Amino acid sequence: MNKSLQLRIQQELENADIEHAGRLLATYMKKYPYDYDNYSCKIAILMAEGKLEEANKVAWEAYHVNHYNVENLYNMAVIYMEMKEYLKAVEFLNRTLVVELIQKEYLIPRETLEQEINQMMEFVNKRLEELPEELKGAYLEQCSMLMRMVERKFDMHETEFHGMQKD
C-alpha cells in the first residue's frame, strides 16, 4: 500500500474520523483491490467502529491468503483479546512470536507483548474459577510459554544485533 495513504488513513483513525478513513480506503481498494495491506487497514477501521465480528472475518480472509503475515496474526490476537476470547488470543500471539522468530521480523515491541500477555493472565487469574477445569492448566501454560518465547525472541534478537557490531 502506498505508505503516505496508509499514514493518512492511520491519522484519520487517530483523529476519530472513521468515515473519512473508510472513504480513503475504499478509493484505494478500487484502484488496487489485490493489495494485501488493504486487510490491515480494513481491520483497523472495523475495530475502530467496534465491529469486532466483521474485523475477525476480514482477518480470517487475510489469514487464508497468507498464514505467515506477522501483522495479521497480531491483529487476530488483538481482535480475540477485545472479544474476550483469551485462549484464541494466546494462540495467535503464540503464532505471531513464532513467525517473528522464523522471519526475524520484529514488528511488535517486547513491552507491548509482555503487557498484553500479563493482561490476559490477570484476567484469567481473576476468573479462574469460572473457567472449565480442562482449560485452566492449558491456558496458564500457554501464557507462561508465551512469556518464555518473548524473552527468548528478544534475547536472540539482542544477541544477533550485538554479534553484528564491529569491534
Image: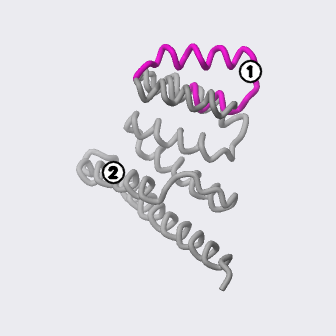
Residue 24 among magenta residues: yes
Q: Amino acid type of disc 1?
A: Pro
Q: Amino acid type of disc 2?
A: Gln
Does 126 appear above or below 78? below
Residue occupying the point 65% across, 78% down: 165
Q: Position of residue 15 (x, y in %)?
A: 41, 25
Task: Between residue 82 and residue 16, name the one nearer to us.
Answer: 16
- Please say which color scheme the image uses: one colour
Q: Residues within 10 Å of mark 1 (few under 14, many from 20)?
A: few
- Which residue is denoted by mark 1 in the rendering? 33
Task: Between residue 145 and residue 31, name the one nearer to us.
Answer: 31
SS state under label 2: helix
Q: Specify the quadrant that holds the C terminus.
A: bottom right
SS state under label 1: loop
Q: Position of residue 148 (x, y in %)?
A: 47, 68
Identify the image quadrant of residue 39.
Answer: top right
Magenta part, dominant SS: helix
Q: Position of residue 142 (x, y in %)?
A: 46, 58
Label 2 and label 1: CA atoms lie apart by: 36 Å
Q: Position of residue 116 (x, y in %)?
A: 39, 51
Q: Specify the quadrant that holds the N terminus.
A: top right
Q: Residues within 10 Å of mark 2 (few under 14, many from 20)?
A: some
Task: Between residue 148 and residue 163, name the one nearer to us.
Answer: 163
Identify the image quadrant of residue 82.
Answer: top left
- What range of the chain is rendered magenta? 16-42
Q: Earlier in the sequence, mark 2 or mark 1?
A: 1
Q: Which mark is residue 119?
A: 2
Residue occupying the point 74% across, 21% down: 33
Does 164 appear above or below 131? below
Task: Between residue 165 and residue 133, name the one nearer to us.
Answer: 165
